Amino acid sequence: MKEMALSQETYDTVKKAQIDEETGAAIYGYLAGKQKDMKNRSVFSQMSSDEATHAGVWKNITGEDLKPNRGKVLLLKILTVIMGFTFVVKLMEKDETVGQKRYERLQAELPQAAKMMEDEHVHEKELCDMLDEERLHYVGAMVLGLNDGLVELTGAIAGVTFALANTRLVAMTGIITGISATLSMAASNYLAERAEGNSMALKSSAYTGAAYLVTVALLVLPYLLFPSNMYVAAFAVMIVTVLLIILFFNYYISVAKEEPFLRRFLEMAGISLSVAVISFVIGIVAKNVLGIDTL
């Protein structure tokens, strides 16, 4: 039974808020259990406890024992493994910011509940700022590896695709070039970080190399999947892959680091595609000038 008579719209809003709080409590509890760092574990435990408390407030109003959104909990758990806990927390923060408009409608019938939600958002923001995730310390290293991998490999593969006109030859060229460039980039990053006195130079270079190597693998993959004579199709898929990598990475950065998405995406995409076009032209010119016949 409900504690007080509410309009149907308000009741539905409170039910949604209760489910959101239960979902938040489940996610933060899961994240707390996964933390090795005691500070992060303490923060997540506090956030889970707060969410459960607020769910209890809504339960007193709805009179219903509602469960978390299991689909959302599963999705966020998967995203935690792939993207890291900071990304998931920031994503939930964004979702709650949108939800604040919904809570504004409660003020007429439940002013105390609306005030509670306002206090909660402020408190959660303070707790989120206390979190510390290792991978975010190395975003610069990952950006270095990703940017260089995209620009260099996109250019190199675009240049040889129409010059060699064979997916297997292009794949071989991309693999050799990519692995060599990965080792070179990681080593260069290590030496640069060491020169600046960074005690974590080795780990920084590992992030750079890993980002570069993943980029190499994704760009070469279409040429390994398509038959040897379908180099145009492989090239088209590679370009789409480049755009998807840029889209994915910049979305991650925009959420986790709260940076603008569109400007960074357009900048990276513009540079990578411009290099691809220039390299493509160079490849065709070189093939004709040198009189190479790949047929």
Image: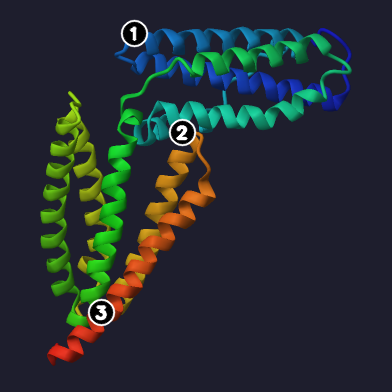
Look at the numbered disc 2 and give the secondary structure of its residue.
Answer: loop
Q: Is 242 on the left-hand or right-hand side of 217? A: right
Alpha-carbon span between mark 2 and mark 1: 23 Å
Alpha-carbon span between mark 1 and mark 3: 55 Å
Look at the numbered disc 3 and give the secondary structure of its residue.
Answer: helix
Residue indicated by mark 1 = 38
Viewer can see residue 15: yes
For label 3, the crowd category at 10 Å Cα-Cα, with few meaning under 14, some 14 to 19 and many 20 or more, is: some
Count of numbered circles on the image = 3
Q: Which residue is located at x 10 percent, y 55 percent?
A: 180
Residue indicated by mark 2 = 257
In front here: 179 or 113? Answer: 179
Task: Report x, y in % for residue 176.
Answer: 10, 61
Q: Is 88 on the left-hand or right-hand side of 58? A: left
In front here: 45 or 16? Answer: 45
Q: Quadrant of residue 178?
A: bottom left
Q: Which mark is residue 282?
A: 3
Q: Which residue is located at x 67 percent, y 32 percent?
A: 98
Task: Report x, y in % for residue 163.
Answer: 20, 82
The residue type indicated by label 2 comes to Lys
Alpha-carbon span between mark 2 and mark 3: 38 Å
Look at the numbered disc 1 and give the secondary structure of its residue.
Answer: helix
In the rendered image, the vertical position of residue 43 relative to residue 270, given as above or below: above
Task: Report x, y in % for residue 207.
Answer: 23, 37
Q: Give the foreground label among 2 and 3.
A: 3
Mark 2 and mark 1 lie on one chain; the one further toward the N terminus is: 1
For label 2, the crowd category at 10 Å Cα-Cα, with few meaning under 14, some 14 to 19 and many 20 or more, is: some
What quarter of the picture does the N terminus occupy?
top right
